[in-house]
Image (cartoon, rainbow, N blue to C red):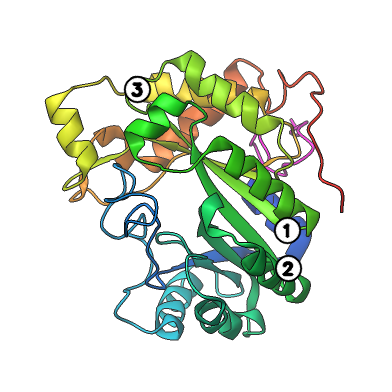
Amino acid sequence: MKNEFIYSDDNKRYHTLNYFYKQKFHTKVCKVSLNAGFTCPNIDGKVGFGGCIYCSKLGSGEFGGNPLDPLEVQFEKGKRMMQRKWPNAKFIAYFQAHSNTYGTIEKLKETFEPFINKKDVVGIAIATRSDCISDECLEYLESINQRTFLMVELGLQTIHSQTAKLLNRCSSLNSFEQVIKKLRSKNIHVVVHIINSLPYETEKMMLETVQYVNKLDIQGVKIHMLNILKDTPLEQLYKKRPFSLLTRDEYVKIVVKQLEYLRKEIIIHRLTGEFGEDELLAPKWVLKKVIVLNEIDKYMSKNNLYQGDLCKEEKYEKSKN
């Protein structure tokens, strides 16, 4: 039977990133993760020290390129690897590790300009924090967006201040909201990251985060399960003040409920993260990514659920362009 979900051309009951890419670029599109050697303001002392407690030394860039290699070399290595499976694919240069707008405009131009008109590159994705986008940076991002497809990915993780303090996020919800409005006033595509099973958060709190996100003028969401990585402050917290982690079945049910609260037009960029077995302390079930995604599909199909089922046509505050 044909899938009735309007933003899918396969068996998915949510708005997949592949569907979005195919509609926009009419071909297979892959992200090539890069490490441009940036840091974060809650690492170097500008607003805090040590970074977010869950973040690895590579700043969530484990699957990015080798930071010792030039960006062009990182990109070509990633491109060749993906072309083995998708020989005709186009690419998005994904600046993933740490906060990739935390630098001078000269540094940003040096980083991003080589990829704007690069052969087979159809866009740029920049992962960063809301407090790393100055007005000058915003003007430059607008310039990029006028020349290629641009996505800015902002780490929120949770709306709950007590958890954010525990995570050492060191940025406010108000700053996050204001930056989204500024980005959208420039027609820049915004993707928000959230994490499930953060220390001591309940299911109700996780759903409150996604209900808040749904009311924002955003275009995409990434949902992650909390990964406890070795040699991080989170590992020490987990050992000293143990907290429960969601089981795979619990995670699947919460993710599906979150999808139901999200507007249908919001693109789902990710529903589970990836880390190597050597780096991961817990939970081990996240290593089987395909199984997690299949369980989400099966649960939605069995219960006849779709993204947006609980949205109730909620209006969001759309920025004036």
Is 320 placed above or below 72 here?
Answer: above
Of the residues shown, which amino acid type is indicated by label 1?
A: Ile
Image position, residue 133 (x, y; %):
58, 59
Among the two numbered marks 3 and 2 on one chain, the one whose residue lies closer to the N terminus: 2
Depth-wise, is mark 3 or mark 2 nearer the camera?
Answer: 2
Residue stretch rendered in magenta on the structure: 1-15
Q: Which residue is mark 1?
A: 188
Q: Which residue is mark 2?
A: 142
Depth-wise, is mark 2 or mark 1 nearer the camera?
Answer: 2
> Which quarter of the figure is the C terminus placed in?
bottom right
Compute the Cα span from label 2 to label 1: 7 Å
> Which quarter of the figure is the N terminus placed in?
top right
Q: Secondary structure at mark 1?
A: loop
- Can residue 262 be found in the magenta stretch? no
Is 83 placed above or below 152 here?
Answer: below
Of the residues shown, which amino acid type is indicated by label 2?
A: Glu
Tell how many labels: 3
Residue drawn at point x = 33 percent, y = 82 percent: 69
Q: Which residue, as the protein is rendered here, is positioned at the far right? A: 321
Q: Are marks 3 and 1 in contact (CB under 8 Å)?
A: no
Mark on residue 246?
3
Depth-wise, is mark 3 or mark 1 nearer the camera?
Answer: 1
Compute the Cα span from label 3 to label 1: 34 Å
- Res 269 seen here: no
Among the two numbered marks 2 and 1 on one chain, the one whose residue lies closer to the N terminus: 2
Q: Are marks 2 and 1 in contact (CB under 8 Å)?
A: yes
Of the residues shown, which amino acid type is indicated by label 3?
A: Leu
Q: Secondary structure at mark 2?
A: helix
Mark on residue 217?
none
Residue drawn at point x = 34 percent, y = 49 percent: 48
Quarter of the rendering containing residue 170: top left
